[in-house]
Image (cartoon, rainbow, N blue to C red):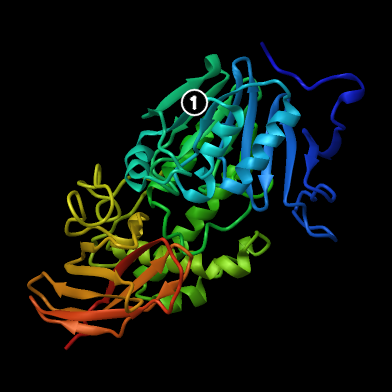
Amino acid sequence: MTHKLPAGPTAIPLIPLIAGAVWVGCGGGEPPSDEGTSAEAPAQFETTEVAEGVYQFRWIGHNALFVVTSEGVVAFDPISVEAAATYAEEIRRVAPGAELAAIVYSHRDADHATGAEVLREAFGGDIRIYAHENADAPLREAADPNLPPPTSTFAETMTLAGGEIELHYLGRSHSDDMAVAFLPAHGLAFAVDFVSRDRFGYMDLASFHFPDMFGAIEGLLEIPFETIVFGHGPSGDRATIERQLTYYRDLDAGVRGAVEAGLSEDETAATVLLEDYSQWDRYDDWRELNVRGMHRKLTAAGVGESGEEGEHGEGGEEGEGEHGEGREGRGEHGGEGGHGEGEEGEESGEYLGRAETWDATRRGARLVFSYDPAREAFAGTVENTTSETLCAVRVEVHLSTGTELGPTERTDLASGASTAVELAAGGEAFERWTAHPEMSACAAR
């Protein structure tokens, strides 16, 4: 049967928040404004009814979604162990007596998917967990009891609760396992991390797959939603996603022009100002980082190098360099299925664990790198595998905390030559990391 809010004197008070949404409870304080600013600090959590029987659960800066269906509650993204405990209480309070029918991961990132076992235990059952098939192997390998692997996966689409919920895979975007939910009866979608409402992409876009992102966002616009709930920030509509797509196209075009003109990363960061987006969230914090990240991706794809361009083209067409043939089924960096020559290294967006070794070749520079916990430093070698000199080679490391290490000093490498490289981590606490070599065109002699 369909579970509804109780009526009469025991009903939960419904307080207007924004058009089409109702605030139905939080951990103290007033509901935040639409722009997330208020005189007082926002409550740690809140539950908002965004459509009949559909609720957004916010925990600090992360949003989850749960849906009261004819088969019970379907809960997306437990967020964390602590959040999941409150999440379970909110589901019980808003939908008393309803069973938890399923848990769905939007993707496997720990800051969204952790805590499923807490939800399971709270509802006393072996509840199924759904995710895209690309999430399965990494989660099984990680063997984190707080982030169990899915019990069921899908490749392209899946329906839950007799079609009340659709799950769609739109290709690689922020991750390679992103599931987008669509509720046809409500015209409502739930999409996490790769899109948001008038907000810059996360930091230097290290985990974002370009040019695939363009196709994923275009695919999202093919879903007939009217309202969309995000993993962070306020909800939006179709125009929100159109603006997001336009932003990434403008970012790509601006940085691409700078790279083709021969501007360095620093020069590009100083000149591609994206002033049309100066009112967007995180402009001051992430504008420069977005530009730098896109510069690295485009140079890794060979843009500006004598026509070797990994251009996405109109509509996000796949091109050589940025993600050419051979990327499918690669898995994590290094080891079996690792990078072949010409792949972009860091720009694939896949991070290694602390104990894993990076072994990848980009534009002829083979980087073999690993973390030494005793020295609190990354160390290894970079080798020129080409028949020509590689000029101004340097190495950077990006930690999962958002910290960037390096780059190392630039050095020219003759054909077949290698050099030792090292970057101190400075005691930074991190779980995952990614690296890449950079190089510049050799000066005319």
Q: Residue shown at 49%/42% (left/top)?
A: 217
Q: Is residue 32 above or below residue 289?
A: above
Q: Amino acid at mark 1?
A: Asp
Q: Residue shown at 51%/77% (left/top)?
A: 270
Q: Which residue is mark 1?
A: 126
Foreground pick, 18 / 83: 83
Task: Point out the image quarter for the N terminus.
Answer: top right
Q: Position of residue 66 (x, y in %)?
A: 63, 31
Q: Is residue 392 above or below residue 344?
A: below
Foreground pick, 224 / 17: 17
Instruction: Tell me if I can see residue 278 in this picture.
Output: yes
Q: Is residue 179 above or below residue 291?
A: above
Count of numbered circles in the view: 1
Q: Position of residue 296 (x, y in %)?
A: 37, 66
Q: Residue furthest top?
A: 1
Foreground pick, 24 / 266: 24
Q: Quadrant of residue 183?
A: top right
Q: Residue shown at 72%/52% (left/top)?
A: 44
Circle 1 SS class:
loop
Instruction: Tell me if I can see residue 238 in this picture.
Output: no
Side of 367 where 57 appears, left or right: right
Question: Callout 1 environment at 10 Å: few (<14), some (14 to 19), or many (20+)?
Answer: few
Q: Is residue 44 above or below residue 406?
A: above
